[in-house]
């Protein structure tokens, strides 16, 4: 096993060794399950009504009325939970001194950051995997569009990967996990709300802010439309935050 | 093995170490002494590549820590004052993890071997120590786990920052014995910092004394002890003429009769030969040198201030 994978494995198992990891996992499963139950119930009421209304029957679509909104809700849930998942990644190591072990080892700051990122991404993927049985139930009850389901999963996973990259940077900025959580959540919220910047700022600046925002890039994917520019956006976004985190870790040596 | 040249490190406006120079030969055990805030930990952290120096250079086995940090760090095992442990891991998992970070080809075998070396292959309350959760171990065991992580890649150089700090006397004695074993049997280069001078006397060949970020003395313990001290002379006869004679010797600070036939002579440099010569004609029975390293250390620190 390479050092990067060893760090990733340690981080992933570390989530299950403390209460925060379990709280995030169970909390996410319960809340997304609740959303799913409410949305399914609402959808079934609409579907029942549609049987008596031929005009409405054409419009009631499982993919559009249940799957897409469910993943949109999941995205917001992840926006709130991702900083809680990532807050400990580097801040805790600094606080308890275990970062010394990594800094004194013959590995680069980039390897440390990549290992921690992979560990956290593995955990958030496990969180997302908790929704698979819910979506699986839809296959038992109806016939959802598999392409759309996969596309929604890809969009949510890419967005979660971006959230983890942001959270990792904020965790590297402070020794205090709560501060990392607050900054991380604030930064993600700004990146999310920047999608409405063009309505407040005219011209290129507004367009640029919308372009940087995460939301427009997952909207297309969640409709099942895969654009290379969105993939490039997420790779660039994640790459930028990981690079910044590696620079921050390197800066510990030169403070 | 270790060459430190003109090493300086500043944190903002604070100069932690300033133009430090020293060398340590292969197989040598060197104690780094100094009061709190003297710059010992900073020096050690720079040696291990944990932090970068503001100026100057450190070479480990001929490799520049700044130019080739990965190669240099692979040669060093570092145990900080607070062992860098992951409390939720078992001892074995942690040492295997440390071995993997160090790029050891067979981390499990290396971990087993190292746990044996540091005495963590035994059982504790019916469960092997290696299977215990680190967070539930005593300070002494935690220190050994940290030492195992520092040793797992069989480094040429071992850097230990106050390894016995916070341990009870029995744990301290055990760990000291282990460190002596590691230094003597395995011919490893060891740098250790401590406040316990008895530890330095027991383990080290040489000491480097740092104060206010500067090296104020580098010497063997034997020589440092002989630099200054109190000599006790047991004599047969009148003490007064001898005291007058002793006070004329260059290097003698004070001479007093402490009891009948016993004179205490405080010196500021090694002048045992002159004292013995002067006392020989005054019925000298016995001459003893009774100063610990602690007095020398304190005198050097005070002198530097």
Image (cartoon, rainbow, N blue to C red):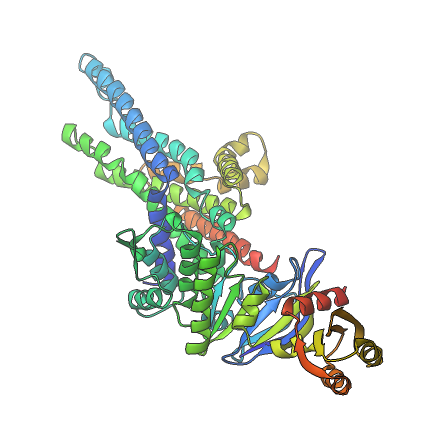
Q: Image check: B62 left or right of B151?
A: right
Tally of marks = 0
User: Residue B109 occupies which quadrant of the picture?
Assistant: bottom left
Q: Let me know if residue B66 appears in the view.
A: no
Q: Residue at x 45, y 71 (%)?
A: B74
Which quadrant of the figure contains the C terminus of chain B?
Answer: bottom right
In this view, the residue in front, A30 or A200, is A30
Instruction: Judge by depth and name the residue closer to the eye, B240 or B19.
Output: B240
In the image, residue A184 sits, relative to residue B119, either above or below, namely above
- Outermost residue on the top side: it is A52
Residue name at image x 36 percent, y 34 percent: A23
Where residue B215 appears, x then y in whole percent?
A: 68, 70
User: Whole-percent x and y of residue A76?
Assistant: 40, 32
In the image, taking residue B8 as reference, residue A225 lies left or right, namely left
Relative to A80, residue B299 above or below? below
**Picture quadrant of residue B149:** bottom left
Residue at image position (54%, 73%) is: B204
Residue B71 in sight? yes
Residue A252 placement (x, y as % from top left): 56, 56
Expressed as whole percent of the image width and height from the top left, the position of residue A127 reads: 31, 39
Q: Is B111 on the left or on the right of A145, as rendered?
A: right
Q: Nearer the viewer, residue A44 or B24?
A: B24
Depth check, front residue: B268 or B186: B268
For image coordinates 77% across by 87% down, the residue present is: B281
């Amino acid at each position: 096993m390479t050092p990067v994978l060893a760090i990733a494995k340690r981080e992933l198992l570390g989530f299950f060794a403390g209460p925060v990891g379990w709280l995030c996992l169970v909390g996410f499963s319960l809340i997304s399950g609740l959303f799913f139950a409410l949305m399914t119930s609402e959808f079934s009421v609409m579907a029942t009504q549609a049987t008596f209304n031929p005009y409405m029957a054409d419009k009631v679509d499982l993919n559009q009325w249940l799957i897409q909104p469910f993943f949109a809700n999941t995205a917001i849930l992840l926006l709130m939970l991702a900083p809680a998942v990532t807050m400990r990644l580097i801040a805790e190591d600094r606080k308890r001194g275990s970062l010394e072990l990594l800094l004194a080892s013959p590995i680069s700051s980039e390897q440390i950051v990549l290992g921690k990122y992979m560990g956290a991404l593995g955990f958030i993927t496990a969180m997302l995997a908790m929704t698979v049985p819910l979506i699986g139930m839809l296959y038992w009850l109806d016939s959802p569009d598999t392409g759309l389901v996969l596309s929604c999963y890809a969009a949510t996973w890419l967005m979660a990967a971006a959230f983890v990259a942001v959270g990792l940077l904020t965790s590297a900025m402070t020794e205090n996990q709560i501060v990392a959580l607050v900054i991380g959540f604030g930064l993600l919220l700004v990146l999310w709300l920047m999608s409405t910047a063009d309505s407040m700022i005219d011209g290129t600046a507004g367009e640029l802010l919308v372009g940087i925002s995460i939301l427009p890039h997952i909207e297309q994917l969640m409709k099942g439309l895969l654009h290379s520019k969105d993939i490039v956006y997420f790779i660039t976004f994640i790459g930028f935050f990981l690079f910044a985190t590696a620079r921050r870790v390197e800066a510990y040596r030169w403070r | 093995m270790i060459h430190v040249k003109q090493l300086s490190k500043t944190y903002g406006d604070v100069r932690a170490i300033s133009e430090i120079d020293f060398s340590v030969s292969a197989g040598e055990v060197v104690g780094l002494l100094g009061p709190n805030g003297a710059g010992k930990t900073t020096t050690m952290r720079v040696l291990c590549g944990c932090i970068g120096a503001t100026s100057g250079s450190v070479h480990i086995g001929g490799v520049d820590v700044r130019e080739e940090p990965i190669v240099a760090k692979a040669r060093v095992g570092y145990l900080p004052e607070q062992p860098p442990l992951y409390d939720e891991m078992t001892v074995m998992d942690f040492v295997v993890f440390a071995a993997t970070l160090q790029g050891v080809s067979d981390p499990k075998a290396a971990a087993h071997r190292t746990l044996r070396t540091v005495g963590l292959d035994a059982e504790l309350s019916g469960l092997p120590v290696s299977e215990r959760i680190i967070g539930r171990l005593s300070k002494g065991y935690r220190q050994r786990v940290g030492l195992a992580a520092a040793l797992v890649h069989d480094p040429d150089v071992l850097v230990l920052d106050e390894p016995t700090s916070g341990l009870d006397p029995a744990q301290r004695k055990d760990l000291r014995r282990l460190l002596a074993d590691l230094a003597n049997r395995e011919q490893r280069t060891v740098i250790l910092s401590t406040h316990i001078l008895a530890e330095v006397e027991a383990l080290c060949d040489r000491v480097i004394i740092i104060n206010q970020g500067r090296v104020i003395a580098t010497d063997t313990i034997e020589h440092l002890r002989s630099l200054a001290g109190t000599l006790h002379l047991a004599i047969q006869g009148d003490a007064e003429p001898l005291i007058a004679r002793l006070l004329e010797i260059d290097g003698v600070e004070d001479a007093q009769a402490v009891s009948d036939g016993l004179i205490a002579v405080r010196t500021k440099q090694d002048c045992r030969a002159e004292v013995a010569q002067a006392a020989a004609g005054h019925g000298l029975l016995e001459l003893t040198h009774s100063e610990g390293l602690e007095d020398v250390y304190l005198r050097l620190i005070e002198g530097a201030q």
